[in-house]
Image (cartoon, grey):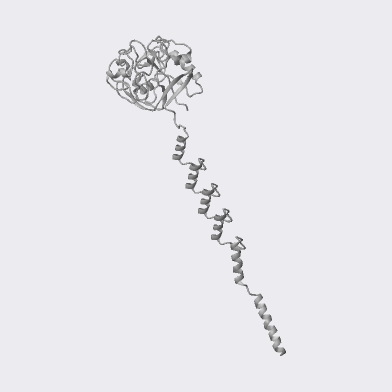
Amino acid sequence: MRNCVIWSVVLLAMVGTACNNDPKPLEQRKAAQESDAGSKTKGPAEPEKAAQEVGAAGKTKGPAEPEKAAQEVGAAGKTKGPAEPEKAAQEVGAAGKTKGPAEPEKAAQEVGAAGKTEGPPKELAVDLGGGVNLELVLIPAGSFMMGDDAAKPVREAKPVHKVNITKPFYLGKYEVTQEQWEAVMGNNPSRFKGPKNPVERVSWDDCQTFLGKLNVKTGGQGSKFVLPTEAQWEYACRAGSTTTWCFGDDAARLGDYAWYDDNSVDNTHAVGQKKPNAWGLYDMHGNVWEWCEDWYDGGYYAGSPADDPSGPDTGSRRVRRGGSWLITAGSGRSAARYFEEPWLGRLFDLGFRVARAPAE
């Protein structure tokens, strides 16, 4: 009987020990489920589950996948890491702020949208004060055939030769008027009075005085005012034409473009009343002769340089171009060359227009 009791005690002890060493997998699974339900992680989370938690809570607990990180940048507007180039470019367009180098085409569009001009304006209006403006037209660089092989009345306009105007420049839209002269000089030497009529009875030297004062008056508004060279003048007058006048060869049409002896009634007229040439310049034929910068030399064309010729280095007479209200149709041809002494030449059919290089 005693032996049976002893063996019973031993068996009970063994059973208790075995029960204490049981890992209880069911209870552990329940504990893990309770942890998931309570959003509390007791150990390392699976990568996929961690990523889902980041998306749900908006907080990154570890390295995010590249694609998901880029999506977060777009949604939140904040960059947490390197953005894809295409997406970055889209952000620049949306926000109006450049975070990196912009594409050339996009940059050009932004300049246009902002109202900024990359090149010089096609026209300028320079304020001379008192409501008087000096209007200028941009003449493009280019090449043309200078001169005229026709006989008289074209003086020394031979041989026809190619000239290259290598840089754009501005030229007066109109001949300098009396009100413009008065605004700069304070006087009016003209015979045929009228504020919009071209100033006349001015020598080449008088024009240089005007230009000097004009440059002082407008010193902050761009580059220097000068007289055009003879090559610049003919290039601008022709405006791409190769004919006798800027409009063609028919003298019967000259009255549409010029004041000359057939229609002027023996005096000057307000500028801009006739048709302009193809580049928007008025009175390039007729009204008043126009001084040029060059010294005159009847044989200069034979050895003239091809690029930007500026006339002989010295001389006794200066070039004048374009004809006037007093002369015949033939004397106002695009290529016709005449001259006058620079210190005299105060004729009542002789004036000028200004030129100017674009501001650097």
The location of residue 351, given as percent across then percent down, is: 40, 14
Residue 296 in view? no
Residue 106 relative to residue 4: left or right: left
Q: Tell me what residue is drawn at x 68 percent, y 81 percent.
A: 12
The location of residue 107, given as percent across then percent down, is: 46, 38
**163 and 225: which is toward the camera:** 225
Residue 113 relative to residue 41: left or right: left
Write down the quadrant of residue 266 in the picture: top left
- In this figure, what is the number of numbered marks? 0
The location of residue 194, given as percent across then percent down, is: 41, 12
**341 and 232: which is toward the camera:** 232
The location of residue 182, given as percent across then percent down, is: 46, 13
In the displayed structure, would residue 104 be above or below residue 190? below
In the displayed structure, would residue 189 be above or below residue 133? above
Q: Tell me what residue is drawn at x 55 percent, y 60 percent.
A: 49
Residue 311 relative to residue 243: left or right: right
In the displayed structure, would residue 97 be above or below residue 202? below
Residue 113 in view? yes
Extreme residue toward the right, this view: 2
Write down the quadrant of residue 172 in the picture: top left
Quarter occupied by the N terminus = bottom right
Extreme residue toward the bottom, this view: 1
